[in-house]
Amino acid sequence: MAILVKVSRMRHRDPESEQDDRREAAADWFVRLDAGAMSQAELTAFRAWLVSDPANEAAFDEVCDLWGGLEGLRRRLAPAPERKPRRLIRRLAAGASLAAAAIVLLVASDDLTLIWKADFLAGPDVRTIALDDGSRVQLNARAAIAVDYSGQARRLTLLRGQAYFEVAPNPARPFIVEAAGGTTTVRGTAFDIETQDSRTEVTVTDHVVGVSTGDGEEVVVVAGRQTAYGPGFGVQAPYSVDAAAVTAWRRGQMMFQDRPLGEVIAALSRHHRGFVLVLGEALRRRRVSGVFSTADPMAAIRTIALSLGLRTITLTPYLVLLRA
């Protein structure tokens, strides 16, 4: 009789338990995607799971939305310097249900559209990809690209983040990278592209590239120089740059010269399996210079916090706050 009861319960699970299973599966897929090295078979399995039941897609959307909700919570809490630290921590933890969502904070903030479009994604580590034509792409942490090769051209799209391209020469098939509304065209060279919120930077380390946007002529950029473009402005005239510093991430380092704290922490935290939030707009604008290792991003972040006299508040191993 006891066995019959047990079997009956297994066959008639309550909807809440089934939903918990879906959320757990969604979080598990996030963790595997975060590792940045899923095979094509695994990606196919993920997509099959996603489309097999609308409830699966809803659960995955919920996981994606949790990161967006956390960003909103940060904005609501940041302008209240008079709030006591303990009260702030309690409100943040309770308001976002962070304890229950800790597993979700293991993963990147990839949304469903990005995952669907990308052919290659990087997790918290640098990922190297060998393309069919002999070219190589290195993805910085959390970067994503889509590849569309044809007989006439080799097209890629940098969907997010930073990547370094070493292009195999082929005059008959130009190598074209689209990123944030701009196009970089080469036939055999090496260069770096980084997309940011307000600008995209193209840095050439070998030979020549052409950079253009839809509203301007192509600008030629030679080795050792950089250009930028973004919303509201076209491709800038090339200027000299320390290309070794720009590409230091390929050697496990990040170099910053008088950069805003918010930008520095965001760059370092991409190498961390979790999220680091800087509370307060004034604090995010403070300037930082230095060379930091990406092998232990939290050690670098704690060093910065100590040098600026900031408090480091660890809510979970995957969520850390910095405040004055």
Image: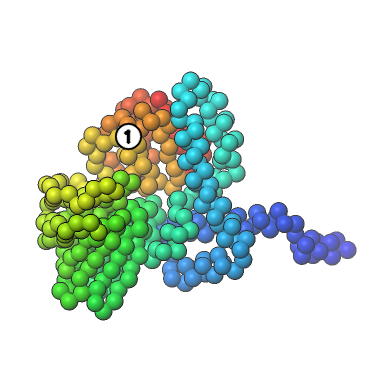
Quarter location, residue 57: bottom right
Q: Quadrant of the N terminus?
A: bottom right
Horizontal and vertical percent position of residue 247:
22, 51
Point out residue 89 in the picture as x, y percentages from the top left corner: 53, 30
Q: Nearer the viewer, residue 309 or 2?
A: 309
Q: Residue furthest top?
A: 82
- Does residue 78 sit above or below 15 in this rendering? above
Going 49% across and 46% down the picture, which residue do you hit? 67
The answer to whether residue 251 is visible is no
Is residue 50 visible from the viewing direction of this image?
Answer: yes
Hey, what amino acid is under mark 1? Answer: Leu
Up-down relation of residue 291 to residue 47 (above or below): above
Q: Is residue 18 left or right of residue 81?
A: right
Report the residue marked by disc 1. 261
Residue drawn at point x = 43 percent, y = 68 percent: 39
Residue at 75% over, 57% down: 14
Left or right: 52, with 283 as reference point: right
Task: Locate residue 234, reporting x and y percent.
Answer: 21, 51
Split into 4 quadrants, where in the image is the C terminus? Answer: top left
Q: Is residue 173 above or below residue 104?
A: below
Q: Residue at x 24, y 77 (%)?
A: 152
Q: Residues within 10 Å of mark 1 (few under 14, many from 20)?
A: many
203 sits to left or right of 26: left
Residue closest to the far right: 1
Say which element carries label 1.
Answer: helix
